Image (cartoon, rainbow, N blue to C red):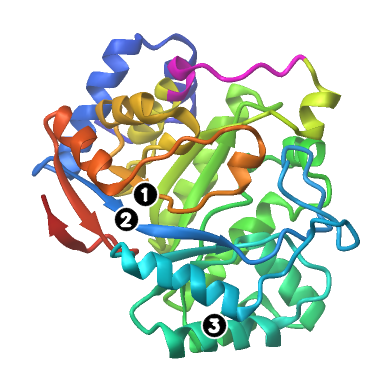
């Protein structure tokens, strides 16, 4: 069989039999992961600041610098959070913040060096494309220069956040100040070229069409063909509570679990050059997160010791390591703790 075309993917999204899609996606997953190992990582999401000028309409987390509850964490506060993570056997911090208008590259270099010096066992997976884009602008550097400087100070990989839907029509509606689809891809391309891996993401359920979902997949599949630099694909649905986007477009309805699983299955079939696809239990809840393992996902993502962004939009699903292990075993899969690079650290 040849590679799935955009038209075939669109047909499956709109008319594919739901159960057959699940069967096909699960078979595809098994062809890549025949040992039936489902992985997870023990990490903490540290939002180093909530100050942001980008004003994405789908975000309920950001604050402007002069608002009372705006903050930038001190290095000591960040250190305390890392120590709490180390106590439960954590290996990774997912570092994301708002796009702070005054933080230049030197601040980020000092932060990374401080963490690498004080907590050498912790892997830093941090700073989304929009953060890299802004650091480059405010510091008068290229993407490559920013990434190389941060890499030297301890940045291991970058998350895929900020992709939303890689269609400029949608981006202009939901986040008009955010970088373009092409610039998002260019940040990741630049990272891959210096040997820094990343993840690709997608947030659906706002104002995109099915065609634009497939367009998004096409763009990341093409970049993966070019660089091989994406470790995983992670997809979640828009969480609308407390967001400006929901106020402006009250007709936006919460995506159903069926829709999530359908898109997940088609993504597994279409993204044939992605080894790992993550289940988004944080937005979907543990039951649908578990079902996702039967619809193509081979990774449960993070135990998420701390999560603030999705929680700001009214969603507070939680799971610890033991619950993840039980959930994985319950569907006949073999649980394993991994690191950021998807190396297996421990099997259960």
| Helix, strand or loop status at disc 1 | loop
In the rendered image, the residue lying farthest to the right is 66
In the rendered structure, are the residues bearing label 2 and label 1 in contact, judged by CB atoms less than 8 Å apart? Answer: yes
Q: Is residue 259 a member of the stretch shown in magenta?
A: yes
The residues tagged by marks 3 and 2 sit, at their Cα atoms, a distance apart of 21 Å
Place residue 87 in its image quadrant: bottom left
| Helix, strand or loop status at disc 2 | strand
Tell me which label, 1 or 3, sits earlier in the chain.
Answer: 3
Is residue 124 in sight in this rendering? no
Q: Is residue 139 above or below residue 13?
A: below
151 to the left or right of 246: left
Classify mark 2: residues with Cα within 10 Å, few (<14), some (14-19) or many (20+): many
Q: Magenta stretch?
A: 251-260
The residues tagged by marks 2 and 1 sit, at their Cα atoms, a distance apart of 7 Å
Query: x%, y% of residue 270?
Result: 38, 34
Tag shown at residue 112: 3
Q: Is residue 21 a member of the stretch shown in magenta?
A: no
Can you tell which of label 1 and label 3 is closer to the viewer? 1
| Helix, strand or loop status at disc 3 | helix
**Residue linked to disc 2:** 41
Q: Is residue 142 above or below residue 172?
A: below
Residue found 12% across the figure and 40% down from its top: 36
70 to the left or right of 334: right
Quarter of the picture containing the N terminus is top left
Which secondary structure is most common in the magenta stretch?
A: loop
Classify mark 3: residues with Cα within 10 Å, few (<14), some (14-19) or many (20+): many
Tag shown at residue 303: 1
Query: x%, y% of residue 329?
Result: 14, 35
Can you tell which of label 2 and label 1 is closer to the viewer? 1
Tell me which label, 2 or 1, sits earlier in the chain.
Answer: 2
Tell me which label, 3 or 2, sits earlier in the chain.
Answer: 2
């Amino acid at each position: 069989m040849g590679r799935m075309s955009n038209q075939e993917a669109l047909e499956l999204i709109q008319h594919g039999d739901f159960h057959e899609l699940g069967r096909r996606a699960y078979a595809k997953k098994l062809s890549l992961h025949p040992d039936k190992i489902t992985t997870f990582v023990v990490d903490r999401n540290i939002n180093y600041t909530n100050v942001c000028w980008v004003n994405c309409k789908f975000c309920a987390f950001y604050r402007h610098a002069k608002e009372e509850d705006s903050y930038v964490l001190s290095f000591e506060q960040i250190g305390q959070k890392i120590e709490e993570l180390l106590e439960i056997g954590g290996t990774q911090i997912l570092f994301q913040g708002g796009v702070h208008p005054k933080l230049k590259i030197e601040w980020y270099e000092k932060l990374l060096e401080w963490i690498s010096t004080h907590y050498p066992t912790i892997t830093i997976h941090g700073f989304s494309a929009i953060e890299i884009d802004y650091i480059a602008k405010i510091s008068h550097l290229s993407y490559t220069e920013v990434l190389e400087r941060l890499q030297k100070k301890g940045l291991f990989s970058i998350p895929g956040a900020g992709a939303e839907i890689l269609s400029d029509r949608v981006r202009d509606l939901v986040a008009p100040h955010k970088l373009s689809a092409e610039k998002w891809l260019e940040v990741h391309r630049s990272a891959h070229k210096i040997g820094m891996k990343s993840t690709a993401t997608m947030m659906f359920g706002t104002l995109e069409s099915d065609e634009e979902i497939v367009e998004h997949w096409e763009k990341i599949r093409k970049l993966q063909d070019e660089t091989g630099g994406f470790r995983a694909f992670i997809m979640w649905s828009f969480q609308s509570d407390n967001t400006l986007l929901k106020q402006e477009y009250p007709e936006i309805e919460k995506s159903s679990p069926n829709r999530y699983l359908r898109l997940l299955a088609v993504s597994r079939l279409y993204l044939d050059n992605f080894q790992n696809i993550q289940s988004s239990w944080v937005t979907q809840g543990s039951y649908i997160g578990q079902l996702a393992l039967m619809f193509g996902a081979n990774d449960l993502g993070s135990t998420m010791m701390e999560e603030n962004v999705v929680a700001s939009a009214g969603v507070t699903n939680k799971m610890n390591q033991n619950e993840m292990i039980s959930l994985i075993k319950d569907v006949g899969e073999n649980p394993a703790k991994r690191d950021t690079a998807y190396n297996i650290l421990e099997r259960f």
